[in-house]
Image (cartoon, rainbow, N blue to C red):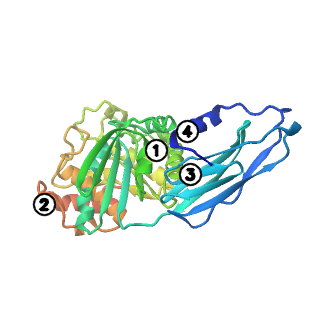
Amino acid sequence: MKKINLIASILLLLFLHIAPSCTKGNPYGGLSLSISAPPENFMAGQTAEMTVSLSGTPEAGAPVTYKWMSLNPTVVSLEYSNDKAELKALKGGRAVIIVYIEECETVTARATVDVVYEGDGILRILAIGNSFSQDAVEQYLYELFMNDGQEVIIGNLYIGGCNLERHYANISGDKAAYEYRKVVKGQKTNTKNVSVSEALADEKWDYISLQQASGLSGKYETCSPYLPEILNYVRSRSRSDVKMIWHSTWAYASSSNHADFPKYGSDQMTMYNAISDVAKKIMDSPAYGIDILIPSGTAIQNGRTSSLGDTFNRDGYHLETTFGRYTAACTWYEAISGKNAADNSYAPSTVSEAKKRIAQNAAHNAVKSPYSVTDMSDF
């Protein structure tokens, strides 16, 4: 019996992608493989057997040696002996099982195995983002959930200014390119040189968010072809019922000198409307199948109509660190929990009662009406 480790899996998968097809007329021409049905209701700690069947006969008595691998060995590990493999479920999630003929690598078969997730009551949220996800989830979101009695683990895969194209390139090359910021029991850690695959395997994430870089957030054409590929990758390595989030970010301050602001005529409402339009197209498209929209940009724009005005940014584009970040955190809290942020009593000590009310109601109105600005001039 032989074990396949993660490094071997990655190398072997790359090899399969570049291996030449078996030419016509060789001893293995016309052969095909099929795998037995994957186990149902497969739970962590259980084992199951899968077998492979060969259709056709190799010529001249040529040997047939089967090789097996799990593309997500942190979820399902395996040991194999030629045409049989013993699978072991390690934790909730999804793994793709591949078997191929060693003598002719392009004769392959695959099956998807789901391991049933058994919850522990902890909510797990991962953002694949940039500095705008840093503003939104790394401060205050944990406290909002805990104040509601909900234990939560929050992760943020951070590269400053990272756009969808770069996320896709990092995933394609399995690059350890991120800072992995994580909040557990209120304590934040930061691990450098982490890949998306490593972060996905680290927890049984309930929610995973994606977002575009701020300067491209109102340019729908920049989502393709990257967003569908990223979604497919993330879903294939996550628990089967993971909820995907689109984080719709905010327009720049009217006085911003950000290099990308001229793409929107250096006009805040033009940028906001473009961002909202992109969010609506993404949420309306069955090709993406996004489950939840977090309209942080609409929440910030709502807040700008209040007595606070255009003060939600600290540098023209990143959020102000107290009520600005708190507004985004309230939006995340309500969009995920389904509870009115205005009913949550938590606010950081740096946020006054008046600013707390503005932030909470800006978030609440955004979740109710994500594609339009609510006038909060009475606040």
Q: State which tag comes first along the sequence, 2 or 4.
A: 4
- In the image, what residue type sits under mark 4? Ala
Answer with mark 1 or mark 3, whichever residue precedes in sequence. 1
Judge depth for marks 2 and 4 and give the one in front: 4
Q: Is residue 374 above or below residue 19?
A: below
Where is mark 1, residue-wise?
A: 197
Q: Nearer the viewer, mark 3 or mark 2?
A: 3
In this rendered view, identify the residue nearer to me: 124 or 6: 6
Question: How far across and down, in percent of the image, does residue 306 sit?
Answer: 19, 55
Precedes in sequence: disc 4 or disc 1: 4
Q: Residues within 10 Å of mark 4 (few under 14, many from 20)?
A: some
Q: Is residue 302 visible?
A: no
Residue 287: mark: 3
Q: Which type of secondary structure does the marked residue at label 3 adopt?
A: loop
Amino acid on which the number 1 mark rests in the picture: Ser
Q: Report if residue 108 is visible in the image.
A: yes
Residue picked out by circle 4: 8
Q: Secondary structure at mark 1?
A: helix
